[in-house]
Amino acid sequence: MLDKESEFVVLYAEDDDDQILLIQEAFKKSQSDIQIRQVRDGEELMDYLLHRGAFTNPASAPRPDVVLLDLNMPKKDGREALNEIKGHALLRHIPVVVLTTSRAEDDIIRCYELGANSYIRKPLNFIKLIEILKAFSEYWFRVVALPFRGSTNQERNPLN
């Protein structure tokens, strides 16, 4: 396992406790050098990313390498949060991957219009979820170059 500074940080925005547990377990089975951080709605997501409220301490809210975003959440849904992230000069470069049960073509089109980097439909089968997260991890953390990877914490968190 990599040291804490080298681990990849995935911020998972999801309000369903069962889904949170499934994703955590699937990541454990698919990848060992990922730190999963979670928020329960779009407002918490924005607070985390902007270091507001309960997330003012950057050490407890490290800048994510990728945001995994559910669409159907309370307070501020995933579409609203995605729009806000991609419209914010300091956040827009963070990859946002929609991970949702929605199979609606309108949701897929809208998310890409708002700037989503990928759209993944949650599978109904846990084994398939592990396979998807292995592919997700391989692609985002082994294949592509991510912004701010290897830079200092201050460079990774320009809001500090």
Image: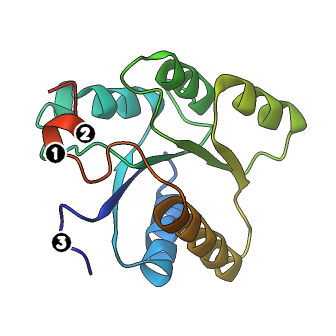
Q: In the image, is 51 to the left or to the right of 136?
A: left
Q: Which residue is mark 1?
A: 152
Query: Can residue 12 be seen by looking at this rendering?
Result: no
Q: In the image, is 119 to the left or to the right of 28?
A: right
Local crowd at mark 2 within 10 Å, few (<14), some, or many (≥20)? some
Q: Which residue is mark 2?
A: 156
| Coloration of the structure image | rainbow
Q: Residue at x 32, y 43 (%)?
A: 148
Amino acid tagged 1: Thr
Mark 2 and mark 3 lie on one chain; the one further toward the N terminus is: 3
Mark 3 and mark 1 lie on one chain; the one further toward the N terminus is: 3
Residue 56, how many percent across, how many down?
Answer: 14, 30
Residue 154, how many percent across, how many down?
Answer: 14, 36
Q: CA distance from mark 3 to mark 1?
A: 15 Å
Report how many numbered discs are placed on residues in the image: 3
Q: Which residue is mark 3?
A: 3
Q: In the image, is 9 to the left or to the right of 108?
A: left
Amino acid tagged 3: Asp
Amino acid tagged 2: Arg
